[in-house]
Image: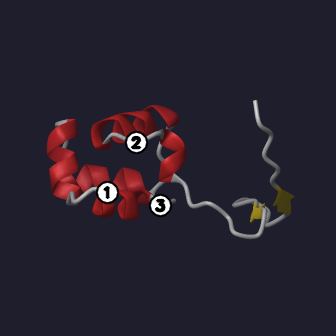
Amino acid sequence: MYVKEVIKNRGLLIKDLADKLNINRISLTSMINGNPTISTLEKIAAAIGVEVSELFDRPSTGTIACPNCGTEIKLTAEKV
């Protein structure tokens, strides 16, 4: 995940974001370092003014590895 970098790029500290979300810094850090839910990611994204998709690292090769089994997954983009 790219959450910490996005927070930093927005000129915020983890503590600042935790304050915006009305939670303590340790809880926020645990959420970010763990496996946050979509709901949590939506709250974080809204608090820092970005889309949820910006919280994820974008692969440079067009593939990502499954975090569970390591299988390479090819990504393609389609204009809608």
View extreme (front): residue: 79
> Which quadrant of the figure has residue 63?
bottom right
Q: Earlier in the sequence, mark 3 or mark 2?
A: 3
Q: CA distance from mark 1 to mark 2?
A: 10 Å
Label 2 crowd (10 A; few <14 / some 14-19 / many >=20): some
- Find out whether the residues at labels 1 and 3 contact each other: C-beta distance under 8 Å: no
Across and down, in percent, residue 7 comes to 31, 57
Q: In the drawing, does residue 56 fall left or right of residue 67?
A: left
Amino acid residing under circle 3: Tyr
Q: How is the image coloured?
A: secondary structure
Give 63 or 32, whichever is nearer the viewer.
63
Amino acid residing under circle 1: Ile
Q: Nearer the viewer, mark 3 or mark 2?
A: 2
Residue 71 visible, this angle: yes
Q: Earlier in the sequence, mark 1 or mark 3?
A: 3
Residue located 79% across and 67% down the image: 70
Residue placed under numbered mark 1 in the picture: 7
Residue located 80% across and 53% down the image: 75
Q: In the image, which disc is placed on residue 2?
A: 3
Which quadrant would the C terminus be assigned to in this image? top right
Residue placed under numbered mark 2 in the picture: 50
Give the structural element (helix, strand or loop) at label 2: loop
Q: In the drawing, does residue 5 fall left or right of residue 66?
A: left
Residue 24 visible, this angle: no
Residue located 29% across and 63% down the image: 8
Label 1 crowd (10 A; few <14 / some 14-19 / many >=20): many
Amino acid residing under circle 2: Val
Give 44 or 54, whichever is nearer the viewer.
54
